Image: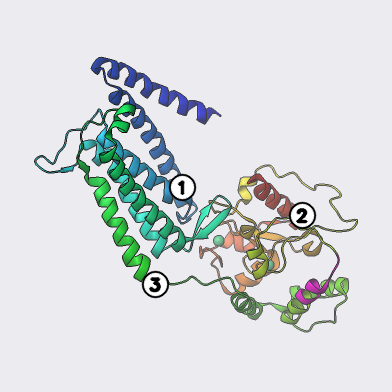
């Protein structure tokens, strides 16, 4: 709320400057221009803040905020160069093209940013996120690119054919073609053709069954026998499946028995159908008497347990080795260890197995400090589920 207040105050200051300056020059254009400078500064501040945050979490900028926003800003501020009351002198004299300090300062940075984002839609990103939804990046790139073209063309046609309409709103100060928009038009056409139509994208490895199986078998090769065997017997007795000789067998039987189990279970976490396809075990509510007797310890600072991702989903709380969400009664006693750097979770036993052969985090490849290796901080599964709930339900 304090943030909102400071934004309002900031805008009010620019509004005031605009009113005074506009009244002195007797021009609405000057007033609106000052207001737009205020909005531009606020937006740019927000962009820089988000970039900083995303860099900290090492996240790609494949969100609507970083793709649509800059394009809209670039187009709008370039369009305004026909109206601007400040910095509007044409630097390109004796041509039909227009370039002013206004377009260089306020339009061009976002025109450039928008074009780079569009390029990344075709070449770098797989998907673009809209809050909790996502769309294929290439499809999105085509939609965005074509919208840009349509918008610029419609704007030009309307601007030059129904000038009266624009004059009734606000007086255009010149009728030259803005160089920014021309650059954006040309670059968008090029981007739609070169990386768009003719460029092939190299797909990233998908989280398929094969991929998971490879990871699991790699993990099994690392297994140190003693602690696991103990755990195994405990598990098999509770699940009354035939005693498995190796861990792999245990895994497969477990997953089979789980899928065969037909008792109605409620999904604790709403997950998309896509997630369910790749991993059949998504968090389940503990049925029966075990259901939440009491919350054990209070977690004072949830941020200590927050995986370093800008956008959290249940995916971020899956064990980095077995790709399963910690489940309470089932995994009880196993414990969860978080990577000290990326804070992604792993089952404690699997994490320790992994450390036998590597001193890098399996997910972020950061070296794990030897003090942490000797004495890793373990959280109970029960508590970690509280952490998951905290972050996943907060996002709704
Ligand atoms: Zn695991
Ligand atoms: Zn890590």
Counting residues from the start of the chain, the first of labels 2 and 3 encountered is: 3
Q: Is mark 3 within 8 Å of ligand 2?
A: no
Ligand 1's quadrant: bottom right
- Image-based side of 64 in relation to 181, left or right: right
Look at the image and tell me whether residue 376 can be seen.
no
- Residue 261 colored in magenta in the image: yes
Tell me the residue at 36%/51% (across/down).
Answer: 150
User: Residue beneath label 3, please?
Assistant: 200
Image: magenta residue range: 255-263
Camera-near label (2 vs 1) is 1
- Residue 80 colored in magenta in the image: no
Q: Quadrant of residue 375?
A: bottom right
Q: Nearer the viewer, residue 348 or 89?
A: 89
Look at the image and tell me whether residue 14 can be seen.
yes
User: Residue beneath label 2, please?
Assistant: 382
Q: Nearer the viewer, residue 95 or 321?
A: 95
Report the quarter where the C terminus lies.
Answer: top right
Q: Residue 22: x percent and y percent?
A: 29, 19
Q: CA distance from mark 2 to mark 1?
A: 35 Å
> What label sits on residue 187 in the rendered view?
none
């Amino acid at each position: 709320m304090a943030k909102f207040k400071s934004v309002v105050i900031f805008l009010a200051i620019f509004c005031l400057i605009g009113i005074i300056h506009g009244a002195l020059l007797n021009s609405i254009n000057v007033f609106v221009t000052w207001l737009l400078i205020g909005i531009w500064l606020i937006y740019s501040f927000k962009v820089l803040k988000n970039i900083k945050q995303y860099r900290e979490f090492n996240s790609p900028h494949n969100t609507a905020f970083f793709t649509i926003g800059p394009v809209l800003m670039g187009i709008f501020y370039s369009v305004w160069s026909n109206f601007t009351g400040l910095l509007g002198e044409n630097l390109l004299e004796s041509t039909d093209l227009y370039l002013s300090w206004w377009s260089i300062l306020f339009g061009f940075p976002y025109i450039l940013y928008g074009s780079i984002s569009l390029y990344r839609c075709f070449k770098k990103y797989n998907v673009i996120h809209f809050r909790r939804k996502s769309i294929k990046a290439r499809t999105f790139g085509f939609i965005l690119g074509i919208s840009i073209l349509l918008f610029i063309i419609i704007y030009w046609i309307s601007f030059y054919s129904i000038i009266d309409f624009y004059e009734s709103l606000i007086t255009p100060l010149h009728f030259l073609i803005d160089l920014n928009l021309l650059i954006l038009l040309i670059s968008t056409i090029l981007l739609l053709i070169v990386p768009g139509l003719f460029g092939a994208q190299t797909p990233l490895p998908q989280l398929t069954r094969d991929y998971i199986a490879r990871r699991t078998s790699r993990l099994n090769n690392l297994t140190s026998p003693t602690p696991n065997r103990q755990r195994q017997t405990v598990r098999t007795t509770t699940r009354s499946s035939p005693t498995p000789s190796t861990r792999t067998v245990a895994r497969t039987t477990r997953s089979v028995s789980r899928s065969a189990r037909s008792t109605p279970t409620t999904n604790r976490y709403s997950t998309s159908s896509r997630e369910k396809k790749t991993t059949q075990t998504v968090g389940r509510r503990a049925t029966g008497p075990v259901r939440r007797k009491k919350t054990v310890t209070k977690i004072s600072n949830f941020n200590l347990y927050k995986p370093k991702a800008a956008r959290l989903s249940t995916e971020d709380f899956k064990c980095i080795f077995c790709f399963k969400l910690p489940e309470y009664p089932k995994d009880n006693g196993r414990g969860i260890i978080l990577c000290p750097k990326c804070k992604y979770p792993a089952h404690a036993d699997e994490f320790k197995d992994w450390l036998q052969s590597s001193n890098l985090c399996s997910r972020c490849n950061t070296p794990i400090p030897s003090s942490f290796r000797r004495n890793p901080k373990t959280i109970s599964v029960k508590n970690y589920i509280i952490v998951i709930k905290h972050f996943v339900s907060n996002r709704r």
